[in-house]
Image: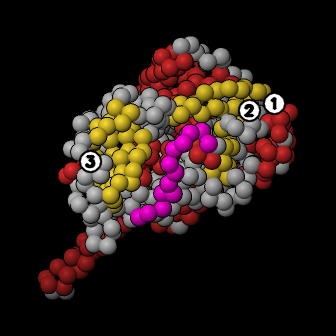
C-alpha cells in the first residue's frame, strides 16, 4: 500500500467520522427540540407527541430521544428558581387585585397553597409527559425499566406514582 | 411626530399597497394621545391606535392624507373593557376555585399591563362535581362546547366560562383548551375555556382567553409549536407562545395582539358587544412588517424599541 493510498484511506475514515459525529450532533439537537416542545406545550394539539415518538422509534434518533426523556423524567428542574418565579407571580397578582378592585376576590388562594400547587404541576407535567413518550419509544426496554426503578423510590405526586406503578407492571 | 412614549409608526408604502399607515402609540398611563400626521406621505390612508395600561384600546380613522385631520390632534383613551368571568369547578381537587381565582387575577394583570385594554372580573364561582362525571363520560363534547350549552345551568351567555376539569380527555396532558363556538373546525372562538387542573400553569388562563379574543389561526395563535405558519414576530416571552417555559417566561402581549384582541370582529369582546360603539376590523390584510407574511397583521406590530417586561 502506498503512502498516498494510506493517506486517502485515512482521510476517508476521518471524513466519515466527522460526518458521523455531525450526524449525532444533529440528532441530539433535533431530539432536544422535539422533546422540549412536547414537555412544555400548552394544548399539545400540533403533533408534538407524535414528533417525539417518530424520532424516538428511528434507529438514528432513538438514543438521543431516550437521553432527553431520561433526563426529563428523573430531573426535578431548578425548583428554587421556579419557586422564586411563582412567588413573584403570586405577589404581583395579589398586589394587582388589591390595587384594581380594592380588595382580594373571594376565595383568593393562600400564598403557599398556590405556589405549592403550581410547583407540583410544573414537576408532574414534565414527569408525566416524559414517561408517556418513554413508554412509547422504549416499551419493554432496559432504559425505561431503569428510570421506572429509580422513580419508584422517590416521593411522587399520587397520580404520577400511579402512572409509574402501572408502567412497571407493563415493563417488569 | 407623536407626543407620547414608545411610538411605532408603520407605513406600508410598497408599490401597489395603497399606502396604508398606522400610528401605534403606547403611553405610560391613562391620558390623552396626541399625534401629528403631517409627516406621513400625502397618499396615505392612515389610522391611530392608542394603548395604555389600565385603559381601553383607542382606534380612530381611517384618515386620508397627511393633513386630515389637520395639524396636531389629540383624543382621550376609552375606559378599560370589563370582561365578566364565570368559574365552573368540575374537578374534585380541594382548593381548585381558590387557585384558579389567583390565576384569573394573574391573567387580568397580564392583559392590563400589556395594554390589551381588558380587565377580567370573576362574577360567579360554582362547584359542580357531578357534572365532571358527565364530562368524563362524554369527552367528544368537550371540544365543541355542546355540553356546556346543553346544560344551561353550567353556562352563562354573557361571560367567559372557565371550566376547571381534572384533565382534558381528548388532549391528555394538555394544560388547557379554548373550545370553538360551532364545531372543532370553526374559525370562531367561543367563550368556553377549559383548564386542566392537574397540569395547568400560571399563564394558562391568559393564554386560553387570548384564543377567545381571536389570537388564533394561521399559526400565529400558537407560535413556537413548530407547526406550519410560525410567526417570526413573537418570541418565547409571549403569552401565546406554545411552549410554556418552566421558569415562567410567558408574560407579554405585543401591541399588535392587543389591537387584534380589541378590534377584531370575531374577538369575544366584540361578539359579546362588550366594547360599546367601537369600530371593528377583520384582521385579514397581509402583515407588512419585517418579512412577516402571515394573514395576521396585528401580532407583528409592537413598540419600536426594547421595553422592560411588565
Q: Secondary structure at mark 2?
A: strand
Q: Residue furthest top?
A: A103
Kindly identify the residue that appears in the image at 79 percent across and 50 percent down.
Answer: B146
Residue that carries the numbered disc 3 in the rendered image: B70
Give me the chain letter of mark 2. Answer: B
Q: Is residue A83 visible?
A: no
Confirm whether the magenta stretch covers residue B281: yes
Dot 2 crowding, Cα within 10 Å, few <14, some 14–19, many 20+: many
Q: Position of residue B259 (x, y in %)?
A: 44, 46
Residue that carries the numbered disc 2 in the rendered image: B88
Residues under labels 3 and 2: Cα distance?
52 Å
Q: Secondary structure at mark 3?
A: loop
Residues under labels 2 and 1: Cα distance?
7 Å
The reply to whether discs 3 and 2 touch (Cβ–Cβ < 8 Å) is no
Give me the chain letter of mark 3. Answer: B
* Magenta span of residues: B273-286
A113 w.r.t. B239: above or below: above
Q: Quadrant of the N terminus of chain A?
A: bottom left
Residues under labels 1 and 3: Cα distance?
58 Å
The reply to whether discs 2 and 1 touch (Cβ–Cβ < 8 Å) is yes
Q: Secondary structure at mark 1?
A: loop
Kindly identify the residue that appears in the image at 48 percent across and 62 percent down.
Answer: B284
Residue that carries the numbered disc 1 in the rendered image: B128
In this rendering, the label closer to the viewer, 1 or 3: 3
Q: Are marks 3 and 2 on the same chain?
A: yes
Query: On the rendered structure, is B67 left or right of B288?
Result: left
Kindly identify the residue that appears in the image at 34 percent across and 32 percent down.
Answer: B32
Q: Quadrant of residue A101?
A: top right
A5 w.r.t. A150: above or below: below
Amino acid at each position: 500500500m502506498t503512502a498516498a493510498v494510506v493517506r486517502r484511506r485515512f482521510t476517508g475514515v476521518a471524513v466519515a467520522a466527522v460526518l458521523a459525529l455531525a450526524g449525532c450532533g444533529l440528532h441530539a439537537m433535533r431530539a432536544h427540540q422535539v422533546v422540549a416542545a412536547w414537555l412544555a406545550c400548552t394544548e399539545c394539539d400540533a403533533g408534538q407527541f407524535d414528533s417525539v415518538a417518530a424520532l424516538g422509534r428511528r434507529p438514528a434518533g432513538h438514543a438521543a430521544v431516550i437521553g432527553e426523556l431520561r433526563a426529563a423524567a428523573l430531573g426535578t428542574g431548578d425548583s428554587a428558581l421556579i419557586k422564586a418565579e411563582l412567588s413573584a407571580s403570586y405577589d404581583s397578582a395579589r398586589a394587582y387585585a388589591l390595587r384594581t378592585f380594592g380588595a382580594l376576590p373571594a376565595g383568593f388562594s393562600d400564598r403557599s397553597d398556590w405556589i405549592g400547587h403550581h410547583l407540583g404541576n410544573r414537576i408532574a407535567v414534565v414527569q408525566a409527559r416524559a414517561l408517556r413518550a418513554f413508554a412509547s419509544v422504549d416499551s419493554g426496554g432496559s432504559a425505561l425499566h431503569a428510570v421506572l426503578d429509580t422513580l419508584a423510590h422517590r416521593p411522587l405526586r399520587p397520580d404520577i406514582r400511579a402512572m409509574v406503578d402501572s408502567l412497571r407492571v407493563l415493563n417488569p | 411626530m407623536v407626543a407620547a412614549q414608545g411610538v411605532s409608526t408603520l407605513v406600508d408604502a410598497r408599490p401597489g399597497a395603497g399606502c396604508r399607515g398606522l400610528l401605534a402609540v403606547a403611553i405610560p398611563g391613562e391620558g390623552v394621545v396626541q399625534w401629528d400626521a403631517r409627516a406621513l406621505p400625502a397618499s396615505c390612508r392612515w389610522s391611530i391606535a392608542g394603548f395604555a395600561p389600565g385603559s381601553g384600546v383607542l382606534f380612530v380613522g381611517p384618515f386620508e392624507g397627511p393633513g386630515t385631520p389637520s395639524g396636531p390632534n389629540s383624543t382621550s383613551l376609552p375606559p378599560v373593557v370589563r370582561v365578566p368571568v364565570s368559574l365552573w369547578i368540575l374537578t374534585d381537587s380541594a382548593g381548585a376555585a381558590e387557585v384558579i381565582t389567583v390565576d384569573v387575577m394573574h391573567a387580568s394583570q397580564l392583559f392590563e399591563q400589556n395594554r390589551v385594554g381588558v380587565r377580567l372580573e370573576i362574577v360567579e364561582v360554582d362547584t359542580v362535581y357531578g357534572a365532571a362525571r358527565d364530562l368524563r363520560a362524554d369527552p367528544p363534547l368537550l371540544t365543541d362546547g355542546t355540553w356546556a350549552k346543553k346544560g344551561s345551568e353550567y353556562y352563562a351567555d354573557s361571560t367567559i366560562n372557565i371550566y376547571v376539569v381534572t384533565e382534558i380527555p381528548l388532549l391528555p396532558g394538555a394544560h388547557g383548551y379554548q373550545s370553538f363556538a360551532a364545531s372543532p373546525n370553526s374559525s370562531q372562538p367561543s367563550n368556553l375555556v377549559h383548564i386542566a387542573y392537574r397540569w395547568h400553569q400560571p399563564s394558562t388562563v391568559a393564554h386560553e382567553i387570548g384564543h377567545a379574543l381571536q389570537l388564533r389561526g394561521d399559526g400565529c395563535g400558537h407560535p413556537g409549536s413548530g407547526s406550519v405558519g410560525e410567526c417570526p414576530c413573537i418570541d418565547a416571552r409571549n403569552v401565546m407562545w406554545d411552549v410554556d417555559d418552566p421558569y415562567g417566561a410567558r408574560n407579554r402581549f405585543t401591541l399588535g395582539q392587543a389591537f387584534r384582541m380589541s378590534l377584531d370582529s370575531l374577538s369575544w369582546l366584540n361578539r359579546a358587544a362588550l366594547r360599546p360603539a367601537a369600530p371593528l376590523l377583520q384582521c385579514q390584510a397581509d402583515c407588512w412588517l419585517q418579512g412577516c407574511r402571515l394573514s395576521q397583521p396585528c401580532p407583528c406590530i409592537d413598540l419600536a424599541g426594547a421595553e422592560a417586561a411588565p
